[in-house]
Image (spheres, helix red, strand yellow):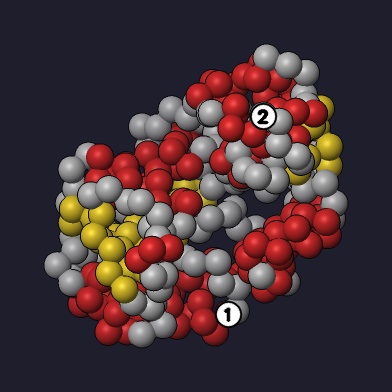
Amino acid sequence: MRVAVVGATGFQGGAIARLLAERHHRVRTLSRKPEADRPELPGVCVTGGDLGRYEDARRLFAGATHAAVVMPLVYQAEKVMRYAQHIAKAAREAGLGRLVYNSNTRIPDRTTNVAAFETRRLAETVFRESLAHSGVEVVAVRPPVYLDNLFSPWNGPALVNEGVLAYPLPADAPTAWISHRDMAEAVCAALTMEGVAGRTFDIGGARTLTGDELAVAFGRGLGREIRYVHLEPRVFEQGLAQTLGAESAAGIAGIYHYMANGLEPDLLAGDEGATAAVLSVKPAPVDEWVTRQPWQMWSGEQS
């Protein structure tokens, strides 16, 4: 395949681009970042550009046979609409066979006032409506929450040194945690698998876990007792803002504010891997994923 990957310089898109390159597909992406600030993407062609300019999107998609799309951490409806329209137009003109959209989150059935949900719903709607009669197939994959969020400077030191797993989900919220790698496997499968065109997959990990159950799984993987602590979404947002800026932090944190309200407690739950199995993906159990991470890098650091 010749795959245009939107978002490959981010964590999720990067996992998809690396997996495709490992499997010897030709992969191309677009980045606004200077070359020195881009992550390493072996085997991936990175060109400068901005989704806000149609000519840049057209250049990314020219010659591509498939596309994998993760929208950037932008939560302004007008900007997301413009990005999605440019992607759809470029995909149509390139004559893609299929576009797989990773929404980066589950999306409630009913509309909400949460930008993280509604802008991703908006992008999916643009793709489906704009490409409906173009010959470009659309598949949507909606993950719950990523395990990789916990292997970070915010969580790693506290987990390793204090046995504390703090996250802004209520302790009783059933969540089907999944890794970036397993999600990338699902997206890659959705790019080529027959019989999935037009479908939406609410994918999840191997098991649905509460906060305390997640802590037990982490404890098995780390070989020590772990305690789950519900981090207030407001505190989470404040910390995230220091790295991503207030606007992106507010967009991401909106998911956790919504979950804290208890309006849809099962939004992030899974089906014990059944949906993943449709895409021939067998997500790793949490404790196995934990065991594979180099947690020693956080040892002795301050949380």
Q: Is residue 292 visible?
A: yes
Q: Which mark is residue 299?
A: 2
Q: Amino acid under label 1?
A: Ala
In this picture, residue 180 sits left or right of residue 98:
right
What residue is disc 1 on?
77
Q: Amino acid under label 2?
A: Ser
Q: Is residue 196 visible?
A: no
Q: Quarter-wise, where is residue 225 in the image? A: top right
**Mark 1 or 2, nearer chain start:** 1
| Whole-percent x, y for residue 140 in the image | 43, 55
Q: Nearer the viewer, residue 218 or 32?
A: 32
Of helix, strand and loop, which one carries label 1?
A: helix
Taking the spot 42% from the left edge, 70% from the top edge, the residue there is 33
| Of marks 1 and 2, the one in the foreground | 2
| Whole-percent x, y for residue 38 in the image | 40, 60
Taking the spot 14% from the left edge, 67% from the top edge, the residue there is 63
Position of 137 relative to 299 (above/below): below
Q: Residue furthest left?
A: 63
- Cα distance in 3D space between marks 1 and 2: 41 Å
Position of 192 relative to 280 (above/below): below
Classify mark 1: residues with Cα within 10 Å, few (<14), some (14-19) or many (20+).
some
| Whole-percent x, y for residue 50 in the image | 38, 78
Of helix, strand and loop, which one carries label 2?
A: loop
